[in-house]
Image (cartoon, rainbow, N blue to C red):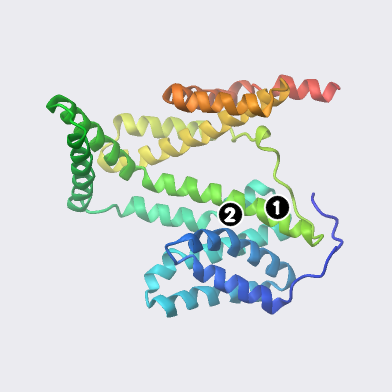
Amino acid sequence: MGGDGHVDRPLPSVWALFGASSILVAGTGNASLLELVGRLGAPVALVLLYRVEPSRALFAALAGFLLLVAVSRDIGLGLRTALPVGVSGLLLARGMTLSLKPSVSIAEASIPFLLIAFFLIAAPPAPEEREAEVDRVVQGSLALNREIGSDPESLKLAGEMTRWMVETAITVMPAALVLYFLGLTTIVYRLACGVLGRYGLAFRELAPFREWKTPFALVWLFAAGLAGVLVGGERAGGWAANLLFGLCSVYFVQGLAVLSWQFRSKGVSTVARTLFFVAAVVLVFPFFVIATTGAGLFDTWFDFRRAGKDAEREE
């Protein structure tokens, strides 16, 4: 538990927090750096305002949504951007106020973004739109390869590879968005912890990254995704591809956590760690991704960090 409930410095006024929350929520509809600032800052401001007066936090999120709609005259933009961020901030504020487990708070705060991804999968772009987008990217790639003097055989291979990569990227875009927003929400949680701690307010801290581990039940979802990709039809295959891509990414992160634990337990310096990751990305990136994902997946069964944890307890 972080903080002890003692307020070390006076909190900003309710109206200052209300205005900052509303403006930041509305700013998420701006396709610029302001969008990222809003996505990171709005939930943090709402968390702090919620501690002061929960009802004001609700009205601040609504005011930000209405402000964006009024300025842009596009309610769809508000529904896609400001509304999910505002609801996410309120859910995060609720979870942190109730002292829920950080993982639960982050999962709840990600629900609005999961709904967006769900609709993207359920209502994919029309086949002709998808094909037009793929063709546009492929033609751009071929034009670049022609400029550098590639031979016809290389052009054909480049076109096929580009088409496969773009089609795959479009298919798993919903899962990629979910992962992006989960990561962003985790960062927001850490930022909120820092802000709450600054004012002496109680919160539950996230465990160190090196200790992060997924529930065992995700293994069955991984198996379902793999089976769906191998034997599913076009629609089922799309759902399965998103599930498999998402869980492979999760196990990749778990593999990084295992690697981070091993580095720390063996006292590897920061410089050596940096050189390792640079070499892995530059020289053997595909192998590094596969090996790290495999380590994360098998850590679910073997708990590669257990021996180190037992040794620490004995000490």
Residue type highlighted by circle 1: Leu
* Residue 55 seen in render: no
The residue singled out by tag 2 in the image is 108
User: The disc labelled 2 sits on which kind of residue?
Assistant: Glu
Q: Are marks 1 and 2 in contact (CB under 8 Å)?
A: yes
Q: Is residue 42 left or right of residue 307?
A: left
Element marked by disc 2: helix
> Crowding near pointer 2: few (<14 within 10 Å), some, many (20+)?
some
Q: Residue drawn 79% across and 20% down?
A: 311
Disc 1 designates what residue?
100
Query: Which element carries disc 1, helix, strand or loop?
Result: loop
Picture layout, residue 261 above or below residue 15: above
Residue that protrudes farthest toward the front in the picture? 148
Residue 78 screen position, x and y as percent? 43, 70
Q: Quadrant of the C terminus?
A: top right
What residue lies at 73% left-to-right and 76% top-to-bottom? 13
Q: 141 left or right of 286? A: left
Residue 147: give x, y in percent of width and height. Answer: 19, 37
Q: Is residue 13 visible?
A: yes
Query: From the viewer's perspective, is 295 left or right of 49?
Result: left
Q: Earlier in the sequence, mark 1 or mark 2?
A: 1
Q: What is the number of callouts on the image?
A: 2
